[in-house]
């Protein structure tokens, strides 16, 4: 079961240029502005910029499905034929993420907040 796609992460080779673009698009300052991640919130959506995204296999934006049990969802996707890109790991504050690639090469992200 999911709560939908509430997060999308863009790989950003040039973080300064990406911040300028998304700042102009969203008309807002980021809520998180670190060398390893920049995050914006807009209309209930979390938009992130990952300067290490390409090195992690991101070829474009990755939608993150918010799930209640990331380990069960991740295992189900692998059993259904997905290829693992990033195993479940904590990105800070108890927030867990993982990602897989489907048979067509599309990236699918999973995200579990500390509250489930």
Image (spheres, grey):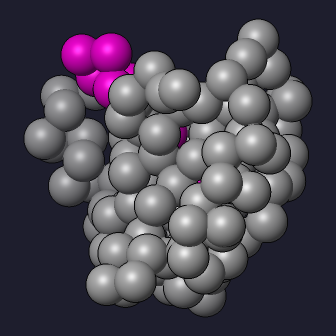
In the rendered view, tell whether residue 36 sits above or below residue 38.
below
Let me know if residue 65 appears in the view. yes
Q: Quadrant of residue 59?
A: bottom left
Q: Position of residue 16 (x, y in %)?
A: 40, 64
Q: Position of residue 60 (x, y in %)?
A: 32, 74
Q: Position of residue 11 (x, y in %)?
A: 43, 70
Residue 79 within the segment the image draws in magenta? no
Q: Quadrant of residue 61?
A: bottom left
Residue drawn at x 38%, y 51% as measured from the top left: 63
Of residues 51 and 74, which is closer to you in this image? 74
Q: Main secondary structure of the magenta part?
A: strand
- Magenta region: which residues? 37-45
Q: Is residue 97 left or right of residue 77?
A: right
Residue drawn at x 66%, y 45% as measured from the top left: 73
Of residues 14 and 1, which is closer to you in this image? 1
Q: Is residue 104 left or right of residue 26?
A: right
Residue drawn at x 54%, y 85% as measured from the top left: 57
In the rendered view, tell whether residue 14 sits above or below residue 64.
below
In the rendered view, tell whether residue 110 sits above or below residue 61.
above
Residue drawn at x 47%, y 46% as measured from the top left: 64
């Amino acid at each position: 079961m999911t709560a939908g796609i509430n997060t999308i992460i863009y790989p950003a080779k040039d973080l300064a240029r990406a911040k300028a673009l998304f700042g102009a698009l969203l008309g807002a300052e980021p809520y998180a502005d670190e060398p390893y991640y920049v995050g914006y919130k807009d209309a209930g959506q979390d938009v992130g910029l990952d300067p290490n995204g390409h090195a992690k296999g991101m070829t474009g934006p990755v939608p993150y499905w918010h799930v209640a049990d990331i380990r069960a969802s991740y295992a189900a996707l692998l059993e259904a034929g997905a290829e693992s890109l990033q195993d479940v790991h904590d990105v800070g504050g108890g927030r867990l993420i993982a990602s897989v690639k489907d048979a067509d090469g599309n990236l699918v992200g999973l995200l579990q907040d500390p509250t489930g």
